[in-house]
Image (cartoon, rainbow, N blue to C red):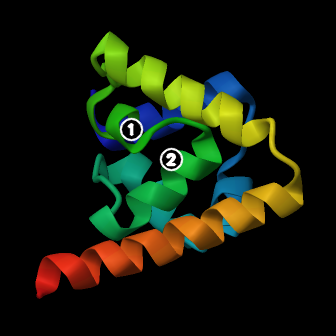
Amino acid sequence: MTISERIFLLLKEKGLTQKALSEYTGISQPAITDWKKKGTNPSADKIVKLSEFLGVSVYYLLTGKEESFPASQNTDIDMLLELYNSLTDFEKGRLLGNLEEYLKSSNSFLCT
């Protein structure tokens, strides 16, 4: 299945319209229609916005397969998300600010 076929299948499954897709992504309706009529695929620079609108990962949109990460990686990511989501908005802001500072200092340390 091609990327464009996957897009139209997802639109149908989710009850979404080509017009809504066009409005969200900024891709013209004639261009979207061409994917269907001519069997062409969207350009690479549109894939992220398309995946956001369709509620699927870029990997799924490109391959039709779910991403598979090692179980330990999923556990770490899930744990981090759970901890982050338990924070207040203020705490999230402080954490992100501290993380940015850490990354800046780490990069300057690594570059010297």
Which residue is drawn at the image coordinates 38% and 80% (left, top)? 104
Q: Is residue 27 left or right of residue 82?
A: left
Secondary structure found at label 2: helix
- Residue 85 x %, y %: 76, 38
Amino acid type of the residue tagged 2 in the rendering: Ser
- Residue 86, compared with residue 24, is above or below; it is above
Task: Say if mark 2 contacts mark 1, CB within 8 Å.
Answer: yes
Q: To which quarter of the image does residue 94 belong? A: bottom right
- Residue 62, compared with residue 94, is above or below; it is above
Amino acid type of the residue tagged 1 in the rendering: Leu
Residue 61 - label: 1
Q: To which quarter of the image does residue 65 belong? A: top left
Q: Residue furthest top?
A: 71
- Residue 78, compared with residue 96, is above or below; it is above
Residue labelled with disc 2: 51
Which residue is drawn at the image coordinates 35% and 24% (left, top)? 73
Quarter of the image with the C terminus in it: bottom left
Marks 2/1: CA–CA distance: 6 Å
Callout 1 crowding tier (Cα within 10 Å): few <14, some 14–19, many ≥20 = many
- Residue 17 x %, y %: 71, 45
Quarter of the image with the N terminus in it: top left
Looking at this view, is 104 or 49 the one in front? 104
* Residue 94 can be seen in this image: yes
Which of the two labelled residues, at mark 2 and mark 1, occupies the earlier sequence position?
2
Q: Is residue 35 left or right of residue 63?
A: right
- Residue 84 x %, y %: 69, 42
- Residue 47 x %, y %: 40, 56
